[in-house]
Amino acid sequence: MKNRSDIEVMASILRSATNGWEYKTSMMNTAAISHSQLIRYLAIGIEKELIEYSGTTGLYRTTESGVFYLRKYEQMVSMLPSVPEILDLEKDPDSPKSPDHVYSSVS
């Protein structure tokens, strides 16, 4: 598995708890992270009000702010080219989508 950024990991955690209250174990498995990583990200998520914790049940869920974060993250990811697309563009520098072509038209 590739190394993911903090933003990607947080998005995975938020996604794991968007359909209701979840246990830590379920969130760990869905986000594919260790317990210590989950604890660290949950603390940040709770502090930033992206995740809500129920002291009565011990469960977590994604807040409205967390859902907003997740939507914005997914919009950003959908706008970025994938690695295979980037490699294809590097092979054909004359392509209108090529970074060289875009930068040369800006200057």
Image: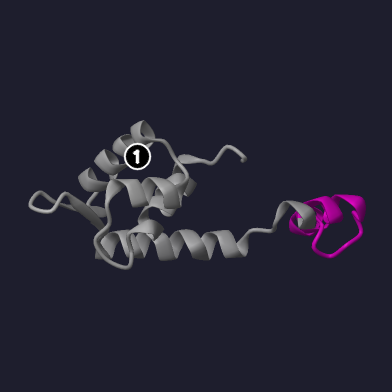
List x then y, in percent, for residue 71: 42, 66
Q: Which residue is mark 1?
A: 38
Q: Position of residue 43 (x, y in %)?
A: 25, 39
Q: Is residue 94 magenta?
A: yes
Residue 44 percent across, percent down from the top left: 28, 41
User: Is residue 65 or residue 60 the one in the foreground?
Assistant: 60
Whether residue 67 sits left or right of residue 83 in the image: it is left
> The residue under label 1 is which amino acid type?
Leu
Residue 52 appears in the figure? no
Highlighted magenta segment, given as a residue range: 86-107
Q: Please tell me how crowded label 1 is: few (under 14), some (14-19), or many (20+) other residues with Cα within 10 Å.
A: many
The local secondary structure at tag 1 comes to helix
Using the image as rendered, state which of residue 21 and residue 94 is in the foreground: 21
Is 32 on the left or on the right of 49, as rendered?
right
Q: Residue at x 22, y 47 (%)?
A: 46
Count of numbered badges drawn on the protein: 1
Quick check: 104 left or right of 7? right
Image point 44% across, 52% down: which residue?
30
Q: Is 84 positioned to the left or the right of 58 in the image?
A: right
Front-most of residues 17 and 86: 17
Rendered location of residue 1, percent (x, y)? 61, 41
